[in-house]
Amino acid sequence: MEPAYHHEKIFDKINFQEYPLSKGEYEECVFKNCDLSNSDLSEIKFIECEFSSCNLSLAKLTNTGVRDLKFKDSKILGLHFNNCSKFGMSFSFENCTLNHSSFYQTKIKNTSFKNCQLQDIDFTECDLSSSVFHKCDFLNSTFDRTILEKADLRTSINYSIDPEKNRVKKAKFSLTEVAGLLDKYEIDIDNAG
């Protein structure tokens, strides 16, 4: 059976647990208010698609193509972006909850994360160069041999990043959260002055 090709289609309020998404390629498609949780999105290619107010929690992403995707107001819990096809991987996130997801060893330079919950995320060996994290919460997220050069975390909170284990040259941090760079020393920093 020939894989399906979908171009500029709008998928609105579809429960893909009941009606599984067909294998193939989706280009410039919009998914609004859809439930893709626990879906098998393996081997599917998404190019310049937008996911708005969707639930993609625990979806399988084995060799999934993700190029120029926009995720907005979506629930994206427990996704393993590290299983996606590495070719052309790029996306942006706005007002999304990505808790318990993994970006292990992904190269996602210049990625935009705006107002996102990024708790318990694995960023080990991830290349986040020049990425922007605007008002994100990194509680319990792992940064280990992560490249954060020129990344902007000035408005983000709850990160714990060891500058000796991660590349942070020219990264931007706020003075109020800079203590997150010193966590391993278990020192008390007081703002009382």
Image (cartoon, rainbow, N blue to C red):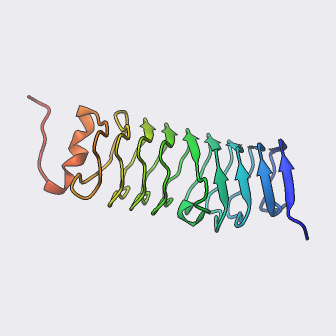
Question: Which residue is found at the position 56% from the left and 60% from the top?
Answer: 81
In front: 173, or 53? Answer: 173
Residue 73: x, y in percent? Answer: 61, 40
Residue at point 64%, 45% (across, down): 68
Lateral position of residue 185 relative to residue 95, left or right: left
Decide if residue 3 is on the left or right side of residue 72.
Answer: right
Number of numbered callouts drawn: 0
Relative depth, front residue between 153 and 25 = 25
Q: Does residue 78 appear in the picture of this structure?
A: no
Q: Position of residue 60 (x, y in %)?
A: 65, 66
Q: Is residue 144 above or below residue 153?
A: below
Q: Quadrant of residue 61?
A: bottom right
Q: Picture coordinates of residue 22 (x, y %)?
A: 83, 62
Lateral position of residue 72 relative to residue 192, left or right: right
Residue plotted at (12% across, 37% down): 190
Q: Quadrant of the N terminus?
A: bottom right
Examine the rendered structure and indicate whether residue 155 appears above or below residue 58: above
Above or below, comparing residue 192 to residue 188 in the picture: above
Res 74 quadrant in image: top right
Q: Position of residue 137 (x, y in %)?
A: 41, 44
User: Which residue in the rendered view is the most extreme toward the left?
Assistant: 193
Farthest residue to the top: give it: 193
**Which residue reaches farthest bottom?**
1
* Viewport quadrant of the C terminus: top left
Work out whether residue 138 can be spotted. yes
Q: Residue furthest front?
A: 87
Q: Give the residue at x 57% y 66%.
A: 83
